[in-house]
């Protein structure tokens, strides 16, 4: 059993009781409460204001039916979600996930993380998340479009430039954002550019948004390595996943002189000692939407069906697929093979046990809510460009992103020092973000 600060234990038990079965949400809350024990001992006012209890309760949760017709004329029914978690710092902001595993508890864990992540960017965005249990795998373009149109036919009444601004996540990229935006525009008769981010470059999207999460992750980890006198140059790197975050993490690692020798999808992983061929990977994943096994076959690289990618020796590991994909066995394998740094590109990819093992072994660990904040930060830059009816160059936007990521690293490192746990980025991220959100909530009354 986990030992929380006595002031926070009853609160955690209440979260368990009021949100039964939502294990991922419980896990995300526990990690934050674990950090906040240190904060409330120093600043008891936050406990008195019951602001931690308020942060754990979403402002609004929407669940809706998404009926649509497949290519065979069969009626399909999915479930849609939007959890509007916290608007103390700005309109709700966070992605949409389309994956068969999505439950309310999944969306709540992601929305909860998003509150703190968005605060860390320093930009005016609150926290939210949404999605559906729709499985895009094997669906035709037209099926995906009809699904997106039906999803937006309900979602449109809950979102808006000043209310709630969705974007992509697993299973939702530029194609889906296009279909969603088109349907929002038809229903509302408004060209409200900043109602969604991740739009196409020709119609209100931002340069670097596609690359932002992966690039930002690598900037953050590079800062972390610099703090110990290291860098990516010449390092062997393993990146799990092969979607949006993974692809652009690989691209930036290669630009910084590292070599990514393995990546994966939900069927297996590929080991490519020459370094992943990004042109081929983008063609297989972004254009053909095919399996990583096809990459391995065409590249003549080793493919391992199932198995654990963390068995591949590396100096830096970047989990960029999904929650709880790096467990205690994975962490032990990484430590045994001499890994020095782990950066979470995905949301909550490392289990609590894995994080403990890595930290105890002295492995640098960057939590997702800090390290993968580059995506949402660039979404906020997209909103800024839309509001001023402007569009920036790639170079300018990338420089803004790099600056934001350096700022988040600095902020987490400084907060960890302030609480006498230098190098503990988990505590640094949680404490710093919480204090900002809590102060805003207290200033705005009992909200
Ligand atoms: P994509 O849909 O583009 O790619 C997801 C990748 O992860 C695919 O390779 C997929 O494999 C794999 N994957 C997904 N679910 C599972 C699963 N249950 N088990 C094993 N593998 C899985 O999504 P993104 O790259 O956008 O997102 C990846 C992670 O990054 C998520 O945790 C997301 O929340 C997080 N994130 C995304 C941001 C963004 O801007 N897109 C921003 C910040 C965080 P397969 O194709 O076989 O399903
Ligand atoms: O997890 C995340 O931060 C995202 N999926 C991106 C959210 C956004 O609004 O850009």
Image: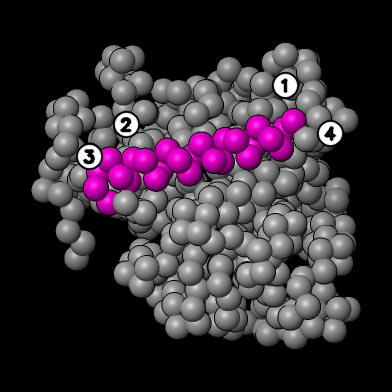
Q: Position of residue 414 (x, y in %)?
A: 37, 41
Queried on whether the Cβ of the residue with tag 2 lies below 8 angstroms from ligand 2, the answer reads no
The magenta span reads 396-421
Vertical arrangement, residue 447 with respect to residue 23, above or below: above
For marks 1 and 2 on the same chain, the one whose residue lies earlier in the sequence: 1
Residue identified by numbered label 4: 201
For marks 4 and 1 on the same chain, the one whose residue lies earlier in the sequence: 4
Vertical arrangement, residue 368 with respect to residue 232, above or below: above
Choose between 62 and 57: the one closer to the eye: 57
For marks 2 and 3 on the same chain, the one whose residue lies earlier in the sequence: 3
Q: Callout 4: helix, strand or loop?
A: helix
Q: Which mark is residue 39?
A: 3
Q: Which mark is residue 385?
A: 1
For marks 4 and 2 on the same chain, the one whose residue lies earlier in the sequence: 4
For marks 1 and 3 on the same chain, the one whose residue lies earlier in the sequence: 3
Label 3, residues with CA under 10 Å away: few <14, some 14-19, many ≥20:
many
Q: Position of residue 213 (x, y in %)?
A: 64, 47
Q: Callout 2: helix, strand or loop?
A: helix
Q: CA distance from mark 4 to mark 1?
A: 12 Å
Residue at figure coordinates x 52%, y 23% from the top left: 124
The reply to whether discs 2 and 3 touch (Cβ–Cβ < 8 Å) is yes
The reply to whether discs 1 and 3 touch (Cβ–Cβ < 8 Å) is no
Answer with the quarter of the image where residue 201 lies.
Answer: top right
Q: Position of residue 411 (x, y in %)?
A: 42, 38
Label 2, residues with CA under 10 Å away: few <14, some 14-19, many ≥20:
some
Residue 418 colored magenta?
yes
Image quarter in which the C terminus is found: top left
Answer with the quarter of the image where residue 71 lies.
Answer: bottom right
Residue 286 colored magenta?
no
Choose between 197 and 272: the one closer to the eye: 272
Choose between 45 and 152: the one closer to the eye: 45
Residue 191 is left or right of residue 96, and the answer is: right
């Amino acid at each position: 059993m986990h030992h929380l600060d006595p002031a926070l234990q009853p609160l955690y038990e209440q979260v368990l009781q009021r949100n039964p079965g939502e294990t991922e949400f419980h896990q995300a809350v526990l990690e934050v409460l674990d950090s906040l024990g240190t904060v409330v001992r120093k600043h008891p006012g936050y406990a008195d204001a019951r602001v931690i209890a308020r942060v754990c309760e979403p402002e609004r949760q929407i669940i809706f039916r998404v009926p649509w017709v497949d290519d065979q004329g069969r009626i399909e029914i999915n479930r849609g979600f939007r959890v509007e978690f916290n608007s103390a710092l700005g309109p709700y902001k966070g992605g949409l996930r389309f994956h068969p595993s999505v439950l309310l508890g999944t969306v709540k864990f992601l929305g909860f993380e998003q509150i703190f992540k968005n605060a860390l960017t320093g930009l005016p965005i609150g926290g939210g998340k949404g999605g559906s249990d729709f499985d895009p795998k094997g669906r035709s373009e037209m099926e995906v479009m009809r699904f997106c149109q039906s999803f937006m036919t309900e979602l449109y009444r809950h979102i808006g430039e000043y209310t709630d601004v969705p974007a992509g996540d697993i299973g939702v990229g530029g194609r889906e954002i296009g279909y969603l935006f088109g349907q929002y525009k038809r229903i509302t008769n408004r060209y409200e550019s900043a109602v969604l981010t991740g739009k196409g470059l020709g119609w209100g999207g931002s340069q670097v948004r596609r690359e932002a999460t992966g690039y930002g992750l690598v900037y953050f980890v590079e800062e972390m390595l610099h703090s110990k006198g290291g860098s990516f140059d010449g390092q062997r790197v393993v990146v799990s996943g092969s979607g949006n975050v993974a692809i652009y993490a690989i691209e930036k690692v290669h630009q910084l002189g590292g070599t990514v020798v393995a990546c994966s999808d939900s069927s297996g992983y590929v080991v490519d000692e020459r370094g992943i061929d990004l042109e081929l990977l983008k063609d297989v994943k972004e254009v053909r939407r095919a399996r990583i096994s096809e990459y391995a076959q065409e590249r003549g690289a080793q493919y391992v069906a199932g198995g654990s990618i963390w068995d591949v020796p590396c100096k830096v590991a970047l989990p960029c697929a999904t929650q709880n994909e790096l467990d205690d066995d994975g962490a032990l394998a990484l430590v045994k093979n001499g890994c020095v740094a782990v950066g979470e590109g995905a949301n909550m990819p490392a289990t609590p046990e894995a994080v403990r093992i890595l930290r105890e072994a002295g492995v640098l660990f960057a939590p997702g809510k800090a390290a993968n904040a580059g995506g949402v930060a660039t979404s906020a830059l997209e909103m800024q460009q839309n509001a001023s009816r402007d569009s920036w160059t790639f170079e300018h936007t990338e420089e803004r992103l790099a600056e934001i990521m350096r700022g988040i690293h600095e902020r987490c490192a400084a907060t960890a020092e302030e609480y006498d746990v230098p190098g503990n980025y988990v505590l640094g991220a949680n404490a710093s973000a919480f204090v900002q959100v809590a102060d805003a909530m207290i200033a705005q009354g009992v909200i």
